[in-house]
């Protein structure tokens, strides 16, 4: 078991310490945001990769009943909503992101009755269910594509992106342009029955839908309504900026060199983030808004800057996604106080007051444990990342196992790789299996309590004996219990739940510090995060946030030397997290 020390606070102590009178008036220029009880504005959203969470029937594969079985754990953690990666019928070329039927459940995950039971049981625990909607493409086994590829005269032929191509030197048809698939090779696949190429941004088994055809929008919206009628709380929209392509099919400009798949590096100006996509999202928002319960649209939005992110909210009108993912903060992959300060301030000030959504982990990237860890202080760094995730003014999105410190377990042999991108790109691209290994529940069997089968779809790493839920629940200093305390603090303390945020010590390149400004009747809370391997002394001036009080009380820290800190003049040990409450005079 990896150990660090943190101060354990009971929830009762946190509540007792909360003041009943306002400490200060809001600082001019930094007004408190209006208090808004909309559920997703305060939510902890937990991504579940269904194949890897819990196997209930002993076949080595996670399923819906397994998720239902673990709802009590999620409730105790403090989760408000679960996002399920696709559980629709699929040939599983891309493990569910190649959908063959949008309105059914893949038998390997269970039945529609199992899904209904999951939603009902989650609701009993005040947990909402969010589905992953794959809008850009379907499987090549979807009935829509089978019809589309059968004949040029088929009514659904224009539901996908087809082109005749151009003649090559040998007289055979060649792709119409230089576009490449993100998963390797040309983005065009020739289909002899219609003597045309279809476009696929991803695998060739994932043909892109033609969103310029209104019938496609109508059909996809209808599929979304099917699940909304079943009570899902909203959608995470997969690869949503890629819905449209340049109608002129112009070549992408080359940017030099080759990627990990051996293809030329190209700009994506003609295949990503085209302006037409925003009309679709506005209409989708209007459709979803007709349902009660504040249904939410979350976007997988890898974007170059915050100005582009704001467009996905709908800018000043706020009529598109409620929660486009801010990957700019969480995927910088470098502990840099200045960078985090700037990026957090950007999303606070440049999105017309919309709600940020910060995320550090998902199913497509190495885990933050490895991306930010230095190999020596990984647990302290993981606690620091968690503190930033749960104490900024943001909806928080986390990924299963993040709370345990599950590391990325990348295959060491190509014959062990399951992810096709790893098979085609080996050895430069090893795929995404490493961040998708089974959830580690306990040390009861070599499958870490995930399954009773000796053969799981991906192997359970040997570290399961110490990195597992059961062991970490028993250890008050564990990363899991750190997450539970942070989430409880986030839920119970109004300064973190509803307050504003003001950066402190803004020229410090090593320590990220900020104050969550209290609404009337509650204490301000200060967060200080040392992002270096050296001790850092700080003396925070709270008057810059309009706070005159100076006496502090430590709420949570991972360092014993800070447990009794009574001011903001402290020395932070390497990668230390300190959260303190400003006391009334």
Image (cartoon, rainbow, N blue to C red):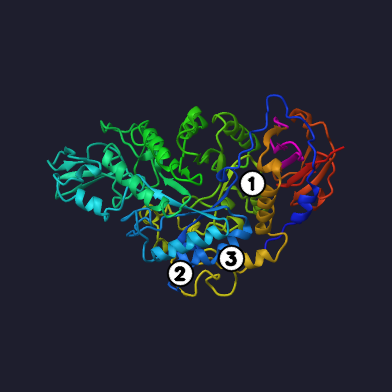
Looking at the image, residue 567 sits to the left or right of residue 347; the answer is right
Q: Quadrant of the C terminus?
A: top right
The span shown in magenta is 505-528
Image coordinates for residue 168, horizontal then vertical, percent = 16, 39
- Residue annotated with mark 1: 390
| Any part of residue 555 in sight | yes
| Any part of residue 437 in sight | no
Sequence-earlier tag: 3 or 2: 2
Q: Residues within 10 Å of mark 1 (few under 14, many from 20)?
A: many
Is residue 65 on the magenta stretch?
no
Of 92 and 172, nearer the camera is 92
Image coordinates for residue 41, horizontal then vertical, percent = 58, 42
Image coordinates for residue 529, horizontal then vertical, percent = 70, 43
Disc 1 and disc 3 in contact, CB within 8 angstroms? no
Looking at the image, residue 207 sits to the left or right of residue 62; the answer is left
Q: Quadrant of the N terminus?
A: bottom right
- Residue annotated with mark 3: 463
Of 362 and 502, nearer the camera is 502
Distance between the alpha carbons at the discs numbered 1 and 3 = 26 Å
């Amino acid at each position: 078991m990896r150990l660090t020390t943190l101060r354990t606070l009971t929830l009762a102590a946190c509540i007792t310490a909360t003041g009943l009178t306002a400490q200060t008036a809001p600082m001019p220029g930094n007004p408190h945001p209006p208090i808004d009880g909309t559920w997703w504005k305060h939510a902890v959203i937990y991504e579940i990769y269904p194949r890897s969470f819990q196997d209930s029937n002993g076949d080595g594969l996670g399923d819906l009943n397994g998720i239902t079985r673990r709802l009590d754990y999620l409730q105790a953690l403090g989760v408000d909503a679960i996002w399920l990666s696709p559980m629709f019928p699929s040939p599983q070329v891309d493990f569910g992101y190649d959908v063959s039927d949008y309105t059914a459940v893949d038998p390997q995950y269970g039945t529609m009755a199992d899904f209904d039971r999951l939603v009902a049981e989650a609701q009993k625990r005040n947990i909402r269910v969010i589905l992953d909607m794959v809008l850009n493409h379907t499987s090549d086994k979807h009935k829509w594509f089978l019809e589309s590829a059968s004949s040029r005269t088929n009514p659904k032929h224009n539901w996908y992106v087809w082109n005749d191509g151009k003649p090559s030197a040998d007289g055979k048809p060649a792709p119409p342009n230089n576009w490449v698939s993100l998963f390797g090779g040309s983005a065009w696949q020739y289909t002899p029955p219609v003597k045309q190429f279809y476009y696929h941004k991803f695998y060739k088994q994932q043909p892109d839908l033609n969103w310029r055809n209104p019938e496609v929008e109508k059909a996809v919206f209808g599929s979304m309504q099917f699940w909304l009628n079943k009570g899902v709380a909203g959608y995470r929209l997969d690869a949503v900026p890629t819905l449209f392509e340049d109608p002129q099919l112009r070549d992408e400009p080359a940017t030099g060199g080759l990627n990990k798949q051996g293809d030329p590096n190209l700009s994506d100006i003609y295949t990503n983030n085209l302006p037409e996509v925003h009309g679709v999202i506005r209409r989708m928002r209007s459709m979803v808004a007709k349902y009660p319960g504040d249904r939410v649209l979350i976007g997988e939005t890898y974007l170059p800057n915050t100005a582009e992110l704001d467009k996905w909210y709908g800018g000043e009108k706020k009529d598109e996604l409620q929660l486009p993912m801010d990957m700019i903060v969480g995927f910088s992959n470098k502990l840099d106080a200045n960078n985090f300060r700037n990026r957090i301030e950007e999303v606070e000030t440049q999105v017309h007051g919309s709600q940020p959504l910060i995320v550090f982990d998902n199913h497509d990237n190495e885990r933050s444990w490895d991306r930010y860890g230095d190999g020596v202080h990984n647990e302290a760094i993981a606690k620091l990342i968690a503190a930033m995730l749960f104490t900024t003014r943001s909806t928080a999105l986390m990924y299963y196992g993040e709370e345990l410190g599950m590391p990325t377990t990348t295959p060491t042999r190509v014959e062990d790789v399951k992810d096709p991108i790893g098979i085609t790109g080996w050895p430069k691209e090893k795929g995404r299996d490493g961040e998708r290994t089974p959830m580690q529940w306990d040390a009861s069997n070599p499958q870490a309590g995930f399954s009773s089968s000796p053969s799981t779809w991906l192997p359970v790493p040997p570290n399961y004996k110490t990195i597992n839920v059961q062991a970490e629940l028993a250890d008050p200093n564990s990363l899991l219990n750190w997450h539970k305390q942070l989430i409880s603090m986030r839920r119970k303390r109004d300064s973190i739940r509803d307050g504003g945020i003001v950066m402190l010590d803004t020229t410090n390149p090593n320590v990220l510090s900020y104050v969550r400004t209290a609404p009337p009747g509650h204490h301000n809370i200060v967060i200080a995060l040392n992002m270096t391997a050296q001790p850092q002394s700080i003396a925070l001036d709270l008057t810059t946030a309009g706070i005159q009080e100076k006496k502090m009380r430590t709420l949570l820290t991972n360092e014993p030397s800070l447990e009794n800190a009574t001011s903001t003049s402290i020395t932070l040990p390497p990668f230390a997290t300190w959260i303190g409450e400003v006391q009334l005079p």
